[in-house]
């Protein structure tokens, strides 16, 4: 048979030896990337999420020994090895898969940039151009993090992500409380070196009793900082 690609061999070695296996025996679910909401056969509504942060968390969790499932929207990133990858498009598909798999997981990282609204009707035929304005009625999608918080098993670590253009910490703390999450990773979209697209991020980790600012670092490094918090929660005997 053919030898595996060198890149695959390197990834496999990294997976075995890269870091301490403090999540061995744990099951981790990560959602990543944008959602796509169809308007007609050729158009859709989406956002600028690249999936880089979610993929970094999934890879880091696998390196640390976790059985890792990644649910991903459309991205251009190759799924990391050693991970079960499930591809979705719409917020509704993401909702179904995430709520089905989350109850059996020790930690859930809701990194996806989920559409808050989708077209109320999907046209089976391409919508033709007219001279006057076109109005597109939208309806709300389901709130996945809220649902995960409501059905959270005892001891599960639930982590949400928050992207804001203003009142970052205040809005993120509200989200933590309203969604019954254990941690919110708060990002300011307007800060240089943070947010969608780039390889770095600047974040504040918000828990029930702490706010931990994290300086600018690579998304891979931030993934490990985030997983340190999850591992501490799971390994401190807090599971009942």
Image: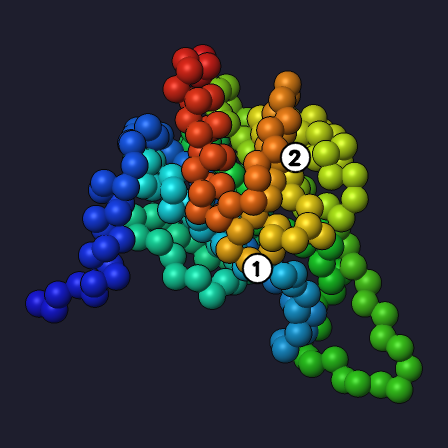
Left or right placement of residue 28 versus residue 2 in this view:
right
Residue position for label 2: 146
- On the image, the x and y values in percent for residue 159 come to 55, 34
Q: Disc count in the image?
A: 2
Secondary structure found at label 1: loop
Quadrant where the N terminus sits is: bottom left
Q: Residue 69's image quarter?
A: top left
x then y, percent, for residue 74? 52, 62
| Residue underneath mark 1 | 197
Residue at the spot 34% in from the left edge and 48% down from the top edge: 83
Badge 2 marks a residue whose secondary structure is helix
- Give the residue displayed 49% in from the left and 41% down from the top: 222
Q: State the separation of the CA atoms marked 1 and 2.
A: 26 Å
> Could you tell me which residue is drawn at 73 percent across and 39 percent down?
168
Q: Report the residue that reaches farthest toward the right.
A: 132
Residue reaching furthest to the left:
1
Pointer 1 or 2: first along the chain:
2
Label at residue 103: none
Residue 119 in the image: state x and y as whole percent: 74, 62
Q: Position of residue 77 (x, y in %)?
A: 44, 62
Nearest the eye: 179 or 55: 55
Residue 183 in view here: yes
Q: Is residue 67 visible?
A: no
Residue depth check, mark 1 versus mark 2: number of the one nearer the observer:
1
């Amino acid at each position: 048979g053919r030898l595996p690609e060198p890149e695959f061999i390197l990834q496999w070695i990294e997976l075995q030896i890269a870091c301490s296996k403090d999540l061995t025996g744990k099951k981790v679910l990560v959602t990543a990337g944008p959602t796509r909401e169809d308007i007609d056969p050729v158009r859709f509504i989406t956002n600028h999420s690249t999936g880089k942060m979610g993929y970094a968390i999934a890879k880091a969790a696998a390196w640390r020994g976790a059985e890792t499932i990644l649910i991903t929207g459309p991205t251009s990133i190759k799924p990391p090895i050693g991970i079960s990858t499930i591809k979705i498009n719409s917020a509704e598909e993401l909702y179904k898969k995430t709520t089905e798999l989350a109850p059996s997981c020790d930690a859930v990282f809701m990194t996806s940039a989920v559409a808050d609204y989708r077209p109320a009707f999907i046209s089976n035929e391409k919508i033709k151009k007219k001279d006057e304005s076109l109005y597109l009625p939208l309806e709300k999608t389901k709130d996945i993090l809220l649902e995960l918080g409501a059905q959270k098993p005892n001891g599960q670590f639930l982590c949400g992500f928050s992207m804001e253009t203003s009142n970052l910490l205040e809005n993120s703390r509200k989200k933590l409380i309203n969604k019954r999450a254990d941690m919110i990773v708060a990002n300011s979209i307007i800060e240089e070196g943070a947010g969608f697209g780039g390889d770095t991020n600047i974040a504040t980790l918000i828990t029930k009793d702490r706010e931990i600012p994290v300086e600018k670092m690579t998304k891979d490094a931030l993934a490990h900082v985030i997983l340190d918090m999850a591992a501490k929660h799971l390994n401190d005997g807090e599971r009942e």
